[in-house]
Image (cartoon, coloured by chain):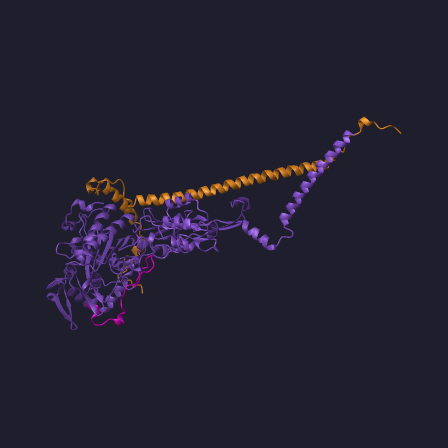
Amino acid sequence: MANKNRRKQIQGYAIPVPVVSVLAVAMLLLLAYVWLDVRSKALGARIKSLEQQQSELQKKYDLELLRWERIKAPQNIEKMLVQSNCAMIWPEEGNIVRLNESLDMASMMTDDKSQMAQLSILTKPLVHD
Amino acid sequence: MTELKYQYRLFIVVLIVLGALNGLIARLIYLHFRFGEGADRNVRLIETRRLETDLMVARGKIFDCRGNAMALDIVKKEICADPAIIISNSCAEAVAGAVARLLDVSPDRIRERLNQPGRRFVYLGGYGRPIEEEQAAKLENMKLPGLFLRDMMVRSYPRGNSMCHVLGYVNFDSDRAGSAGIEQRWHKYLYGVHGLLISELDGRRRELYDRRLFELKPRTGADVTLTLDHFVQYVAEQSLEKAVRENQASAAWAIVERVKTGEILAMASYPDYDPNNFQNVSPELMRNRCISVNYEPGSTFKMTVVAAALNEEVVTSSQIFDCENGAWFYNKRPLHDFHPYGMLSVADIIKKSSNIGAAKVALLLGDKKLYQYLRAFGIGRPTGIDLPGEEAGLLHPLPEWTSLSVTRIAIGHEVAVTALQMLQVLCAIANDGILMKPYLVRRVTAPDGQILFEQRPKAAGRPIRTETAHEMKRLLARVTEEGGTGHRALVEGYSVAGKTGTAQKAVPGGYSDTLNMASFTGFIPVDDPQLAIIVVLDEPKGSVHTGGVVACPVFSEIAGQIVHYLDVPPSTTAVVEGAIKKETSDNRL
């Protein structure tokens, strides 16, 4: 029987390759899970913070809108004019230059012409009883 | 030997680490599955961590036709407290004193609310009573234990009293239901749907976003855009306030309507109230008198009778009637004129407002025809405007009419109308005989911009022919000429047509000799009617309190401003010639 070559003998316990592979994959999955968890938590925190920011901005916007509406109210403008010793008068007809048909006049023309035409044919009073 | 010694140490270390790890794993398993713990404790732990909250939502805004926000929700703070914490910290006195000083209330009231050791939550300022920003900041700086501020939605009306009767107000209850005006009628669009959030909290009571179990986003209410114009409304309100003051009237109301479309530009009533502080306002002040007060219209009603008679061709405008020198007995009952007149044409009956002449015209028309025309003009039924609480007026069914009824209805007695109904009659005349449905809401828009509801001008009937309407316009324009009862209604540069009215108020047992309703209903300009306005003053007290004296100047003041504001072209016809020239200062903003 030939003597064993001690130099060629593997020292210690060799873990089989499949086990190492499984462990490596498990480790990768674990790291991926941890990374995803951290990332989702960070995103969640950011979403929460943005939600709060949006809510705060909405509150501020509404308050500003309220202030602005109070400022531009005719009664406030009139008060300011009195305080500033100013008076406003309507322009004379000769001082007005009309570039196009006024919006108010245009909005008046929105009535339903066909409806009017139908009603204008009637000669007797139309009673809704 | 040395190698063995090291191996032994390594074994010990590994054993300790493994032991510690096992311990941790065992504790984790124990905590996770809670072996041996009572079910109550588990439930309590889950409940402690659980977050279930309603997400606040804003009610829709209300805009005028120019996009000015007339009603909107803002977030304010309300003061809440945890009496258990406050009492355990023995600081009830300090908290009561600080809050009482801030809210300017009695400390006893606060003490009483705090003196509930078993409770974990109380409202210190009262349910639904917000505090101002500065007060909230002061309170936060005090850092009092057990005291905290909570956000709440508050309905705010930036223009205060303006449009109060149209807008209404919102209750403090949890549903925040609209309780009057547009807020009530359009509540189904305006109210928002609360959201719901179910999640978990961390040790510092912060929400864990990744543990969010359920989230229902809140749905903001839809915005309502009115046909009202804030400036026209302001002008009407200012004029009414002045008129009530000058004439010592108990109330006054006015409506401005676009003749051709039925859009209401202003609906004002005085006295008014602030919907931001509606709690202590009497219901009487909250009434929108324009649609909820039935009154006998008096002489303004004569135009209805004459229009019907002209349309039926039973009279012509030049036909002469004997006005009996101011006193006439019909069925043994007397009828008087304010001034005695002899022979008057139908045109002059309108111009001079002769009761006897109008009664004789109505007799020629006959009660059946008169009733038919009144119904056609919309008398005795609501106009269907987009507001709650509209009265129908009062028009007795024909079988209930007495032999005198036709002569009394002809002069605006024995019949009751709302101001809006009376204005509708005038608008039909001004609009070539076509009665338009009045409306206040132009559109309703969802937060995403989708239009949920839109209202367009709609004809509601046609009581008289075009030719009759033209003739009536001519007759009504004479009322504002010199010698007519309504000459104070004139506006410089514009022709005005209309009818004055002064009716004694009905009191138990008959009519009052001192209490009157004075009104003027008119449109402007006559050649191309754009705007119709009605002004009513209740119980004016002065030496002369007729519609021509007290209501016409109010009409003139309102119309004089808004024709400029709305850029209504001045009249070009000869009707203007009789206009009273006014100082430019009258036309100040």
Q: Colour of chain B?
A: purple
**B406 sits to left or right of B264:** left
Q: Residue furthest bottom?
A: B332
Q: Give the percent coordinates (x, y) of residue B112.
A: 41, 55
What residue is at 15 percent from the left and 47 percent from the top?
Answer: B582
Q: Is residue B130 left or right of residue B307?
A: right
| The C terminus of chain B - image quarter | top left
Q: Main secondary structure of the magenta part?
A: loop
Of residues A123 and B252, the one drawn nearer to the viewer in this rendering: B252
Residue B222 seen:
no
- Dividing the picture into quadrants, the one containing residue B484 is bottom left
For residue A34, what is the image quadrant?
top right
Q: Quadrant of the N terminus of chain B?
A: top right
Q: Nearer the viewer, residue B37 or A47?
A: B37
Give the magenta part as a residue range. B381-407
For this rendering, which residue is in front, B284 or B29?
A: B29
Q: Does residue B19 appear in the picture of this structure?
A: yes
Q: How many marks?
A: 0
Q: Is residue B400 magenta?
A: yes
Residue at the spot 26% in from the left edge and 70% down from the top edge: B398
- Outermost residue to the right: A1
**Which quadrant of the structure image shows residue B429?**
bottom left
Q: B196 or B446: which is nearer to us?
A: B196
Seen in the picture, residue B1 relative to B510 is either above or below; the reply is above
| x, y percent for residue B93 | 42, 50
Rendered location of residue B178, percent (x, y): 37, 56
| A53 magenta-colored | no
Q: Which chain is orange?
A: A
